[in-house]
Image: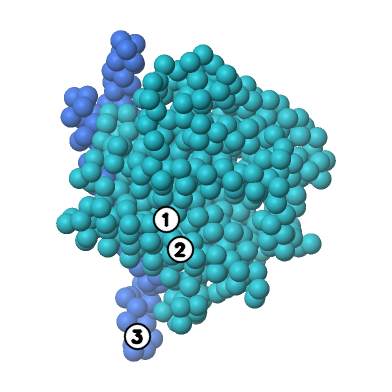
Amino acid sequence: MFDFVKLWDNSFYAMAIILFLIGFWVMLTHSNLIKKVIGMNIMETAIFLFFVAIGYVNQGSAPILGREGVTFVNPLPSALILTGIVVSVSITAFALALIIKLHSYYGTVDADEIAQLRRISDDSE
Amino acid sequence: MIVNNLPALIVVVPLFGTYLTLMLGVKHRKSSSKIALVSTGLLVVFTGFLAAMVAKNGEVFYHFGGWNPPWGIEFVIDRISAFFLLIVSSIGFLIVVFGSGTLESEVKPKIIHYYYALFLVLIASLIAISASNDIFNIYVFLEISSVAAAALVAVQGNKLSIEASVKYLILSTLGSGAFLFAIANIYMVTGHLNLSFIASKLPEAFSLYPLNVLASLGLVLVGLTIKAALYPLHVWLPDAHGSAPTTSSAILSGLVVKVYIIVFIKIIFRVLPPEYLNKVPLEFSLLLMSTLGIFIGSILAMRQKDIKKMLAYSTVAQVGYIFLGIGLLTYNGLIGSLLHILNHAIMKSMLFLSAGIIIKLTGRRRVDSLNGIGRVYPLPMIAFSLGALSMVGIPPLNGFVSKWYLGLGALDGGQVFYVIVLLVSSFLNGLYYLPIVIRAFFGPDSGIQKPESLSVGVSLSLIILSVSTVFFGFFSSIPLEYLAPAVSALFGL
């Protein structure tokens, strides 16, 4: 019998993996480049959620020293993920800038249409 | 003081060079290439010194900010990373020397200081990735390298390169996403980010949570093979390497794809306990992917009409060789793939640089249009031919040596099939490289009347690279003896 209690206890991880798969699917199956970037972001957010969930302790509070009898959450994953968020923002910005440039060349942001346009221009050469 | 802080300085020097190029480049455009030259030159000295230090005193440890691991970030420079650091800095230096003569013709003069800034950031990230012993630190520099590399592809701003850059950026983000997911899994079960501490905790974690460890291994494999362009995850490489400016193609093909292989070697051999190597289906998947990569890369390279695209597909095949050596899991196999990292870095950057200068001088990119070029421009074409012959694996050039060790590794593992793979693929390499060489030297006249002269930087870098192709063919014992203790330690010999 599938262990639903265990799944409920690990619901953060389960959600993160579902989100990761959604992002992955969007990234691989959609030909619209903007949607690809959105999928990329969903995927990265899922990983961030997964990472931060590692540090979560039930009923834990912020790790401020000098207090007695309080359980702390692990602050390290959150600190790491701050870096991860910065990286992901800069990659998104760069990808969008490149897509704007592509749009100015081809008038579309659809990867399939761009490939088609390229094939036409290759044939005419 | 400098000696104690060398591991940090090798990252700081190119980063500082980046700031200088950006600040001074606005007013004095000419200065940026000199700054790049000086900082990569300094790097060669520093990494050479480090490599000698590692050979003399053993591994060099550096703890950032005085925080000891597992709390602080640690750099560990062992023989393998010192070897790779020296490759990065010397090839990077030679590429900058080359670029000082020709870059203006490919990149708009207005943005040339940005180009050098990106180049130096890329070098810094490559160095930090190979020196770092902290897995999250590796991830951050991995992302820096993928942004910088994608920007180096897009820098010309034409249709092809922008498209290639988008593809590269999206796929390499997928790769680093997978790598971060792997880090999350590893951190979850071991509670450490430092590779040495992970290694000590992993046996226990493996028995308690085998699924997490297996998942993270799979994710590391996928993430790093996307970035290293192992078949079938190579789809971004031919476009990116084929449409980038010459110097970018050289550094991307010569160095950037290899750094991920170094990370892979670190994780597979240093972190994973040796007795677990056989419990995961790693060997099978690596050997299958690399064999397919060797063949399909070569076959696709044969079909290319554009010379740079052909070289890019050849990189796919050569990455296959390197992973083949890792997948064999034998001493000689790993030695072979490490040697191939060095030799391919030399050969491929030389091939890209000479092809780039030929394209610039003649305007011909098509493989079948290079008739008689060798008689007009002897130096670039001789460099190209040396690289091509070395790719095919003709003794005494360096490409032969690494293939020899890969073959020995296959025999040690009792897998004769892979010796046949090596032989057949060398034949395939010959099929697409040799016609170019033959056409260039013995083909009909090119119709080029007065050849332009090569600039000093171009000739100098091509000569040094050609000489080192021959040098490392004859004196392959130098890198071999340097690597031997580290590799035998990895295999517990």
- Is the residue marked by circle 1 packed among few (<14), some (14-19), or many (20+) residues within 10 Å? many
Parent chain of label 3: A
Q: Is residue B89 above or below residue B311?
A: below
Q: Which residue is mark 3?
A: A65
Left or right side of B491 for B12 = left
Left or right side of B200 for B418 = right
Task: Using the image as rendered, state which of residue B480 and residue A86 is in the foreground.
Answer: B480
Q: Which residue is mark 1?
A: B123
Q: What residue is at 71 percent from the left and 47 percent from the top?
A: B474
**Disc on the earlier residue, 1 or 2:** 2
Q: Quadrant of residue B437?
A: top right
Q: Is residue B257 above or below residue B373?
A: below
Label 1, label 3: how far apart the Cα atoms are: 40 Å
Asked if marks 1 and 2 touch (Cβ < 8 Å), the reply is yes
Q: What residue is at 48 percent from the left and 15 percent from the top?
A: B445
Task: Using the image as rendered, state which of residue B109 and residue B151 is in the foreground.
Answer: B109
Inspect the image, locate mark 2, and give the three-letter code of the amino acid beneath it. Answer: Leu
Label 2, label 3: how far apart the Cα atoms are: 43 Å
Inspect the image, locate mark 1, and give the three-letter code of the amino acid beneath it. Answer: Ile
Give the colour of chain B: cyan
